[in-house]
Image (tube, rainbow, N blue to C red):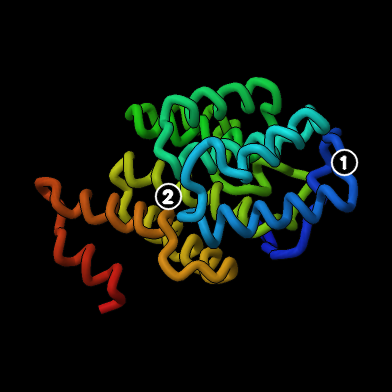
Amino acid sequence: MIQMTFTTDPVSEDMDYDVPSEGDQEIISRLYHRINHHPESIESEEDEYFLTLNQLREKYSNYPTILNYMTMGYSILGLDDKVNELIFDTYNKFPQYLFAMTGVANIYLQEGKPEKTLEIFGNAKSLPEVYPDRNLFHVTEGRAFHHTIAFYYCIKGEVALAQNQLKLLESLSKMMEFKNDPFVRHIKLEILKIGLQPGQNGLAILKSMLGL
């Protein structure tokens, strides 16, 4: 059993990234709250959200969090081409940055290439395997990673393993105080899709998800 702990407090990633000033950290924290709890308020690329991120990007070219927040913003706007382009750009520049890794991995899963997903993580299926020197992770890291691994198991048709990942994902979502987490909805839908396939007991899968 690999031990890991999740926290809502800031976590040091031990990477050689830029360190924003205290004032800019506060700005980044406000952007984090907005994109996670009020995404509907971001309506266009002209929004202050993007303008602020572009300013920060000029100041901190070696700080991947800024690129991650921009990716999330483009996703909210449904600009899939920009999302995918920025994900690969971020991964190429920061190949050990978790959110870039999960972004690329999810693109491969959507393309039906689960084997390429595990290659991104060095064939690891847990965060301590990806980062052997860490056992403390931010809750957003856990949410992104376990959503990706749950999706991987769904693509492979391994329902029980996907459901185990879903339970962990739900607990992480609860830590983040999400009321209707799109990651949780996505995995539930993928599991139900498996239940509709020939040879699968869809009713049993549904009952299991409902705890019946």
The answer to whether residue 97 shows anywhere in this view is no
- Give the numbered dot on residue 150: 2
Give the percent coordinates (x, y) of residue 20.
86, 43
Quote the CA–CA distance across marks 2 and 1. 32 Å
Residue occupying image coordinates x 69% and y 33%: 54
Mark 1 falls on what kind of element?
loop
Left or right: 176, with 204 as reference point: right
Give the percent coordinates (x, y) of residue 193.
21, 50
Give the percent coordinates (x, y) of residue 123.
55, 34
Question: Observer-nearest residue: 200 or 61?
Answer: 61
Left or right: 80, with 36 as reference point: left
Judge the density around disc 2: few (<14), some (14-19), many (≥20) Cα neighbours within 10 Å: many
Residue occupying image coordinates x 59% and y 70%: 175
Q: Can you say whether 62 is above or below 161 in the image?
A: above
Q: Amino acid at mark 1?
A: Val
Residue occupying image coordinates x 63% and y 51%: 141
Q: Which residue is mark 1?
A: 19
The answer to which image quadrant residue 55 occupies is top right
The answer to whether residue 152 shows anywhere in this view is yes
Residue occupying image coordinates x 32% and y 58%: 188
Question: Observer-nearest residue: 211 or 29?
Answer: 29
Q: Amino acid at mark 2?
A: Ala
Left or right: 128, with 190 as reference point: right
The answer to which image quadrant residue 58 occupies is top right
Give the percent coordinates (x, y) of residue 69.
62, 42
- Give the numbered dot on residue 190: none
Q: Can you say whether 53 is above or below 3 in the image?
A: above
Q: Residue furthest bottom?
A: 212
